[in-house]
Amino acid sequence: MNATTASSLESLYHCTDQELDHRIQAARKTLGDNLVILCHHYQREEVYKYADLTGDSLKLSRLASQKSQASFIVFCGVHFMAEVADILSNPNQITLLPDLAAGCSMADMADLPQVEAAWKELGRIIDVESQVTPITYVNSTAELKAFCGIHQGTVCTSSNAGKILRWAFSQRPKVLFFPDQHLGRNSAKQLGIPLEQIVLYQPGLPLGGLTEAAIRNAQVILWNGYCSVHQMFQPAHVALFRQRIPDVRIVVHPECSMEVCDLADDLGSTEQIQQVVRSAPPGSRFAIGTELNLVNRLKHELPDREIHFLCPTICMCSTMFRIDTQHLCWTLENLVQGNIVNRISVPKREAALAKTALERMLAI
């Protein structure tokens, strides 16, 4: 950044909310159609209000690629989301993440060296290339999407994981699913796969803590990863709301544990959760198990419905919370001055392989 032409990030923390709003709006006006701001559903409200497009990570990336007149994509989300936007965007588009520290703890639970080591280790027991289809949740690094591109695998989202698993089983008898064990287990269970054929691979342990017999018997090999937010919801929370509000409708994200999902009335992605709540008649009562910012937004937008956060303690995506108005303002004002900060650029070969895996999913 050129300090003589754009304000320092530190100085913006001395501005009032009104000053920041004025500066962000001024920068947006100057950049015009050359800019598109994306905000994930879990983003904090003071940033979310500046979004040109809102949604889940894949939806946002696909919509941004259709805004071909926008040279700059500013993604108010986390690192893997900005990577997907860069992979799917047009050659003339540049993707920026306002704060590079906005990561994803789940995505960090599986890296390429670990997955390659697991693939090799499993290959000593079974023929992985002919028997195993790798599937990575979209909440993962570009490197892992590229791995799936190489090994005839694909990507899934929380809304299509079941469909992707069905496709995978039409290709090969087994699946290696990473990084989220809960989405994989819940989706596989919904397809009727017995729990004894759904096993958990723990990187760092010999054979991932499994026996050779368990690996040979398994249909789904799950990675030992999880979302730190959705891990907080417990069966006791469901029981508490059932007791307090007998007609409550429990709606949870499939990143929650199987024990919580089994007790819920509805299970779905962020988009599907919103659809369930918005389509319900006035007076409906909900307890929702997903990130707090989304639940609070629904509560504000739908005052004629009774909406509760399923967990009694506050749990939000702390890494996404790193994106604040100061970082957004700093990013935009630098663009106005011709400075590109915090660009997310996936290497070409990796991007091409990851795009193959993503396009395979979209084709399915």
Image: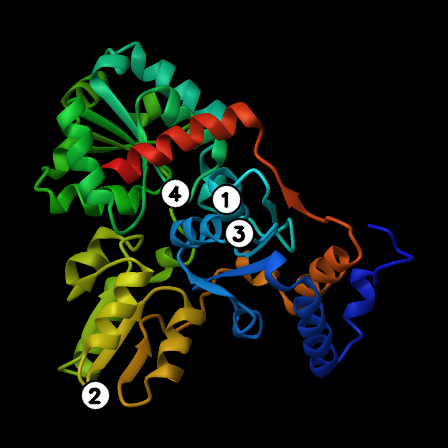
- Which residue is identified by label 2? 282
- Image coords of residue 49 (percent x, y): 53, 74
Pointers 4 and 1 in contact (C-beta within 8 Å): yes
Q: Give the position of the C terminus as an image quadrant.
A: top left
Distance from disc 1 to disc 2, alpha carbons, whole Å, reads 37 Å
Disc on res. 138:
4
Q: Amino acid at mark 3?
A: Val
Disc on res. 80:
1
Pointers 4 and 3 in contact (C-beta within 8 Å): no
Pointers 1 and 3 in contact (C-beta within 8 Å): yes
Q: Amino acid at mark 2?
A: Pro
Distance from disc 2 to disc 3, alpha carbons, whole Å, reads 34 Å
- Image coords of residue 335 (percent x, y): 73, 56
Disc on res. 78:
3
**Could you tell me which residue is drawn at 73 percent across and 73 percent down?**
23
Q: Indicate left or right for 159 with 281 as reference.
A: right
- Image coords of residue 46 (percent x, y): 57, 74
Distance from disc 4 to disc 1, alpha carbons, whole Å, reads 8 Å
Pointers 2 and 3 in contact (C-beta within 8 Å): no
